[in-house]
Every structure is written in C-alpha cells, then in structure tokens.
Amino acid sequence: MTGGLGGLAKSTELRQRVIFVIFALLIFRLGSFITLPGIDPSVMKVLFDQQRGSILDMFNMFSGGALSRMSIFALGVMPYISASIIMQMMTHVYSPLIQLRKEGERGRKKITKYTRYFTVLLAFMQSAGVVNALQNQNTANTILVIEPGTLFLMIGIITLVTGTMFLVWLGEQITQRGIGNGISLIIFSGIVAEIPRALATTFELGRTGALSVSAILMIFILL
C-alpha cells in the first residue's frame, strides 16, 4: 500500500514537472514572436530572407526564428553559452577561479554568479552591435527602424539584454522544477521549431532542381 502511494506521488510529481516544462517552453515560443519596439516586422522579414544560408541563418535556428523576427529574444541564450564556456576555461588557467573551483559548492555558486555577470556584459555588447546595425539598414527606400536615434538604441539594448537574462532565468527554473537541463531544452525547442521551415526550404530547392535527390537524402541522413 505504501509502495502504491509512493508510486502515485512520484507519478504526480513527474506530471507536474512535465507540465511546467511545456508551459515554460510555450512562454519562450510566444516571446520569440514579440518584435523589438520600433522595428517594422515586414521589412525585417525581407532583409533576413536575403541572408538565407548565411551564418545568420544558423544563429536564427538556435534562437527558434527569434532573430529573423528581431524579437525580444533575438539573442537567445547564446551570450550565456559563450560566457559559460569562457568561464569554464578560465577556471583552469586563472588562479583565483582555480581556487574557487576547488572550494566545492561554495565556489561553484560564486562561479555561477560571475558567469551571470559576464553574460550581461556579453549580451550588452552584442545587443549594442545588433541595434546599431539595425539603424544602419535604414535607406531612402527601406525604413526598418521607424524612429532611429538614441532612444531606440537605449530601448533596443535594454530589451535584448533583458530578454537574454529572462531566458537564462527560465532555463534555471526548468532545471530546478522541470526535467533535464533547462538551457539545453530551450536551445533544442528552438531548433525543433525551425525544422518545418528547413524541410519546406529543402523540398522547394529539390523541386526547382537546386538540390539533387542524392543531396536531399544526404541531408536527411545527417539529420
């Protein structure tokens, strides 16, 4: 009887964790459709379509299409991933961090805190570059940024940095209250969300003859 109740409790907890993960990922997907204030979405779509197949397209895949829509989650969690990798490397070459790594849980918490600070710095630098590049896209015939200027720069940078840090927080909540590694699940869900578009593009290239049947088969094998 006790075993049955224990199994029921575990089943209920598992269901709650799964529901929480689904809810968190839905928030991520909804946020990826909220466009950065001051941006014309239709112009952004045209400009990004011209970059298909470039390195930007790959980053767009990791962000779940948020970059192509220039949403509040356009940077995704990539600044955090970069900060984590750099900090992990530094814990093997920088003496103060080496010492922290040897202090166990206490040291790990400090390294995590420093990683968050570094994430904010990287996100600020990246968002500043992105927002400035968006303003430079304005021409006589193309108005991407409706009202360019200092105010747009400030709003854009704050929004993108906040979006990244929110995703980092959301990933941590998934790790603690859901199932698996939250950051990995956010990246995974973004890639999965882009698969239908990637498949449609592949089949269209095959239909027009831009890709041979053997090339398409090889792509599916690699996937």
Image: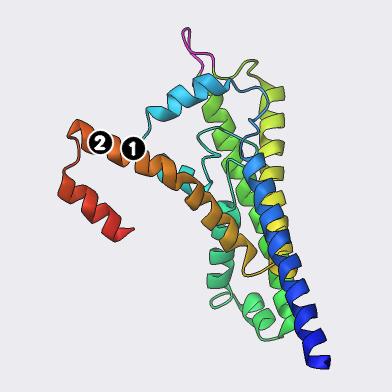
- Which element is circle 2 on? helix
Mark 1 to mark 2 CA distance (whole Å): 6 Å
Q: Please tell me the numbered disc located at residue 131.
A: none
Nearest the camera: 30 or 113? 30
Tell me the quadrant of the picture where the C terminus can be found.
bottom left
Q: In this rendering, would 189 be left or right of 99?
A: left
For residue 1, side relative to residue 70 (left or right): right
Residue 151, picture quadrant: top right
Q: Tell me: residue 41, above or below residue 24.
A: above
Magenta-drawn segment: 138-143
Reading the image, the residue beneath label 2 is: 205
Q: Is residue 187 visible?
A: yes
In the picture as drawn, the residue positioned furthest to the front comes out as 1
Query: Mark 2: which amino acid?
Result: Leu
Residue 172 within the segment the image draws in magenta: no
x and y percent of residue 63 in the render?
53, 46
Q: In the figure, residue 177 lies in which quadrant?
A: bottom right
Q: Are marks 1 and 2 in contact (CB under 8 Å)?
A: yes
Task: Give neighbour class at mark 2: few <14, some 14-19, many 20+ (Cα, 10 Å).
Answer: some
Q: Is residue 194 left or right of residue 87?
A: left
128 vs 191: above or below:
above
Residue at 68% over, 44% down: 163
* Residue 219 in picture, x, y percent from top left: 27, 53
- The disc placed on residue 201 is 1
Give how far across and how far down residue 198 sits, in percent.
38, 43
Q: Residue at x 43, y 47 (%)?
A: 195
Q: Amino acid at mark 1?
A: Thr
Q: Quadrant of the N terminus?
A: bottom right
